Amino acid sequence: MCGIVGILGATPVAPLVIDALKRLEYRGYDSAGIATLEEGCLTRRRAEGKLRNLEARLSEAPLKGLSGIGHTRWATHGKPTEGNAHPHATDRLAVVHNGIIENFRELREELVADGAHFDSETDTEVVAHLVTREMRRSNDPVTAVAAALPRLHGAFALAFLFEGHDDLIIGARRGAPLAVGYGEGEMYLGSDALALAPFTDTIAYLEEGDWVVLSRGGAEFHDKDGAIVAREAHKTQAGAFLVDKGNHRHFMAKEIHEQPEVIGRTLSHYLDMANGTVRLPVDMPFDWTKIDRISICACGTAYLAGIIAKYWFERLARVLVEVDVASEFRYREAPLPKGQLAIFVSQSGETADTLASLRYTRQMGQHVLSVVNVQSSTIARESDVVTPTLAGPEIGVASTKAFTCQLAVLAVLAIAAARARGHIDEAREKELVRELVSMPGLVAESLKLEPGIESLAYELRKASDVLYLGRGTSYPMALEGALKLKEISYIHAEGYAAGELKHGPIALIDEEMPVIVLAPADAWFEKTVSNVQEVAARGGRIVLIGPEGAAGRAGVEALAEVAMPAMPETFAPIAYAVPVQLIAYHTALSMGKDVDQPRNLAKSVTVE
Ligand code: G6P
C-alpha cells in the first residue's frame, strides 16, 4: 500500500527521498510528502495527487536538510487531501506510516482527553501524538518509541524523524515490510530494497515485530521485546533491475512485451533443457504421492493464475485442488487434513490476506509452498519452500508478466506432480516440457497481433459493459480479461464460464454489448463455438480470440477476430494472456486513462 522511506544523508536528502518515492509509487499515489530537519527544525512539504505535485512544491520551496523521511500514500483513513498526507507531525517529531492502526479511535480519544490537537482524519496521526506524549515524559526518542509501540494494534511499518536529532531515524515493522540500507556514512530505510537500489545494494530486513535505530554510523535492531538483536545484511540484486520504461510509453506496455524473455528465464530455472525434463532447483519437503488435496490461495490476478493451475493439477496429476480468494479463505475456518499441500501465489509476497491465509494453513499442519516474485518478501520467508517467478520488478499496477510467469511455474509444478504420482511417463513429461518450452515463442508471436488489437480497442472504448466468455482454462482467462479491462479502463466487464451463459448473462446480450470469446483450439472448442452461436443469434457483437478461421468454423460474423498462432492446447492460457492484456491496455490508452496508476488501486495490498 503506502511507500515509506527515510534517509540520513551526507548531502541534502530531498532529491534522494523523491528518487526513492518514485520507485515506491507503485504502492500508492494519491498524495505524497516529505519532512526534513532544516537546521534541526522539522519542516514538511506535502501535496495531494501524484508525486510530481510534491516535486513542483519542492522546486518552489526547496528543502536542504541532510535527514529526512518521505511517503507516498494509498488512502485508508481519510480522503487523499494534503491535510491527510504524510508525514504527520507534532512539535517533537514527524512520522510516515504504511498499514493500519486498528485501535486508532480509542487512542485518539485518550490523546484528545490528554490535550492533543489533531489536524487530520488519519489513523497515523495517533502515532505521532502517542510518541510525542512519551517524549514529554522521557525526552528520549528511543525510550518514547519503545514505550509507544506496544500500544499500537494492527499491521504497519513506521519511520520517525525527531526535531533536534539530526543523526537519528527510528523504524518499526509489524506486518508490513521494512528494509535498512547501508551506505558510506549514510543510512537508509525503505519499504523495499528496490526503493533503495539507487543508493545501496547492502540491505538488512527487519523481522516481524522489530524496530531499528538508525544513525549515520549504522543500525541497532531491537526485537519486539526490546532486546538488541543482529539482523544480517545481504547484497541484493535489486540494483541490477532498471526501473524505467525503456522505449515504451508505460510500464504496463514494457512488462507485456518483456513476457517472452521473462517466461523463458523462469522456465529455464525449472527445466533441464538438455534432457527436456523438469528439474526443480529445490527439493520438495513433501512427497507428491502422499498429497490428496492442494489448497491454492491468492488475490486478484494471482488468484486467477491459481484457478488455471487447478485445471492443470487435476488433469495432469489427478489431485484435487481447491482455489480460494485469500480474503475469504482466511476467515472460513476450512478443515484441512494434516500433511496436505497449500500453495500461495503472490507477485509482491506481501499481500495481507494471502499472508494471513498462509499462517492459517501452517496452523492446520499443511506443507506451505509459495510462488512469489519478490524472494525477500514475507510470504517467501514464511514458506517451507519457494518456487519463485523470475519476472523482475513489476511496476504497472495491473499484473501482466508476473501472471504469465506464475502460470509457467505452476505448469512446471503440475508436470512434476503428475510424473511423481505416476500419471504420466517420461515420454509424456518430455512432450509437455516441449510444449511449455514453445510458449515464450508463441507469446512473442501473439504480441505481433498488437496493431489489430489497437483498432479493436478503438471500438471497445465506446462500450459501457463487456462480457468475456471461455471454457476450461479459458474460463479463468475470461475472468482475467474482465478484471484487466475494468482495472485500467473503468469499463464494467464480467467474465463467465461460457456454459453459464444460458443461466443469466445471456439476458444482457444486445446489439451494444461486446462479447469477447476466448476459444483456443482445445478440448472445449466445439462447445464454446455453440455458445458463440447463441450470442450471434441474439445479435451480440462478438470478438473471437481463437485459432485462424475460428469465426468461419463457428459460422458467425464477428465484430473482430484475433487470430492466434497454432499452439499446444494445455498451456495455451500463457499465450492467450497476451491479447487479453493488450485489449485492456489499448482500450484504456485510447480512453486517455492512466494505465500504470489507475484510480483507487495499488499494487501491493498490505492491508486487509
Ligand atoms: C493488487 C494488484 C493486482 C494483484 C493483486 C495480488 O490488487 O493490483 O495486480 O494481482 O494485488 O497481489 P500479489 O502481489 O499478491 O500478487
Image: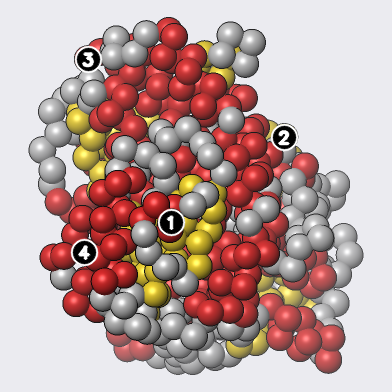
| Residue mark closest to the camera, 3 vs 1 | 1
Disc 4 or disc 1, which is closer to the eye?
A: 1
Front residue of 416 and 296: 416
Residue displayed at 31% across by 54% down? 529
Label for residue 290?
A: 3
Q: Does mark 3 have its CB less than 8 Å from ligand 1?
A: no
Q: Mark 2 or mark 4, which is nearer the start of the sequence?
A: 2
**10 Å crowding of disc 3: few (<14), some (14-19), many (20+):** few
Residue 327 percent coordinates (x, y): 27, 57
Mark 3 vs 1, N-terminal side: 3
Label 2 residue SS = strand
Q: Is residue 504 left or right of residue 431?
A: left
The reply to whether dot 4 and dot 1 touch (C-beta < 8 Å) is: no
Q: Amino acid at mark 2?
A: Lys
Are the residues tagged 4 and 2 within 8 Å (C-beta)?
no
User: How would you rate the neighbour count of disc 2 (Cα within 10 Å): few for under 14, some for 14-19, many for 20 or more?
Assistant: few
Q: Quadrant of the C terminus?
A: bottom left
Of discs 2 and 3, which sits in the foreground? 3
Q: CA distance from mark 4 to mark 1?
A: 21 Å
Q: Which residue, given by chain and number where applicable, does mark 1 sit on?
A: 552
The residue beneath circle 2 is 235
Q: Earlier in the sequence, mark 4 or mark 1?
A: 4
The amino acid type, in three-letter code, at marker 3 is Lys
Amino acid at the residue labelled 1: Gly
Q: Which mark is residue 501?
A: 4
Q: Is residue 555 visible?
A: yes
